[in-house]
Amino acid sequence: MWEYEYSFWSDAPVKCVWSLYADSDAWPLWDTALECLRLDGRLLEGARGVLVPKSKDPVDILVLGCVEHEEFCYETRVDDVSIRVIHRLSEVRPGSDCLPRGGTKITHRCEITGASADRWGPAIGPDFVSGIPAAVNRLAELAGQRSGTPE
């Protein structure tokens, strides 16, 4: 298995961050590497869609799990390899060291598993996750702007 995880904090409440996940039209606003995300319906477990990166081939995705305001995970498969991207939100209560007024910890995690993961992970993983820090930071910024909290 190959894995990568990145977290960032936002002053915005969880519901503001989640609203940007739930609005598939908003994804290119916070993930500038995307041209678009087309979901067949709402962000729910079992939803299928197509992620269209800029300058790359479209990727079919399946939402494997979704707990509103907490996390969702989508997967794409390439041969015998599974690429899962987990988006997790954790409420940060007021008085914490990282966010004295409270807010949200945003975590994006990528896991590459399967029979060829030891070969594919190091080959495609770093490129696949290279934009995650900027996307998460921008997501935090946009959620803060929508909620009226400074970032």
Image (spheres, rainbow, N blue to C red):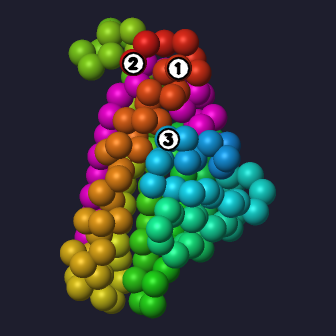
Q: Which residues are magenta?
A: 1-22
What is the quadrant of residue 122 in the picture? bottom left
Q: Residues within 10 Å of mark 3 (few under 14, many from 20)?
A: many
Residue 120 can be seen, yes or no: yes
Residue 82 forms part of the magenta stretch: no
What is the quadrant of residue 90 in the picture? top left
Residue 5 forms part of the magenta stretch: yes
Front in this rendered view, residue 18 or 25: 25
Q: Residues within 10 Å of mark 1 (few under 14, many from 20)?
A: some
Name the residue that disc number 2 marks: 151
Spot occupied by residue 127 in the image (x, y as percentages of width and height): 30, 66
CA separation, marks 3 and 2?
Answer: 14 Å
Query: Where does the N terminus fall, quadrant-wise?
Result: bottom left
Image height of 63 relative to 92, above or below: below
SS assignment at label 3: helix
CA separation, marks 1 and 2?
Answer: 8 Å
Spot occupied by residue 73 in the image (x, y as percentages of width and height): 51, 58
Of pointers 3 and 2, the one earlier in the residue sequence: 3
Say which amino acid is labelled 3. Answer: Trp
Q: Residues within 10 Å of mark 2 (few under 14, many from 20)?
A: some
Name the residue that disc number 3 marks: 30
Spot occupied by residue 119 in the image (x, y as percentages of width and height): 23, 85
Residue 90 can be seen, yes or no: no
Say which amino acid is labelled 2. Answer: Glu
Query: Where does the C terminus fall, quadrant-wise?
Result: top left
CA separation, marks 3 and 1?
Answer: 12 Å
Front in this rendered view, residue 133 or 7: 133
Name the residue that disc number 1 marks: 145
Of pointers 1 and 2, the one earlier in the residue sequence: 1
Residue shown at 29% from the left, 52% from the top: 5
Q: Is residue 129 left or right of residue 75?
A: left
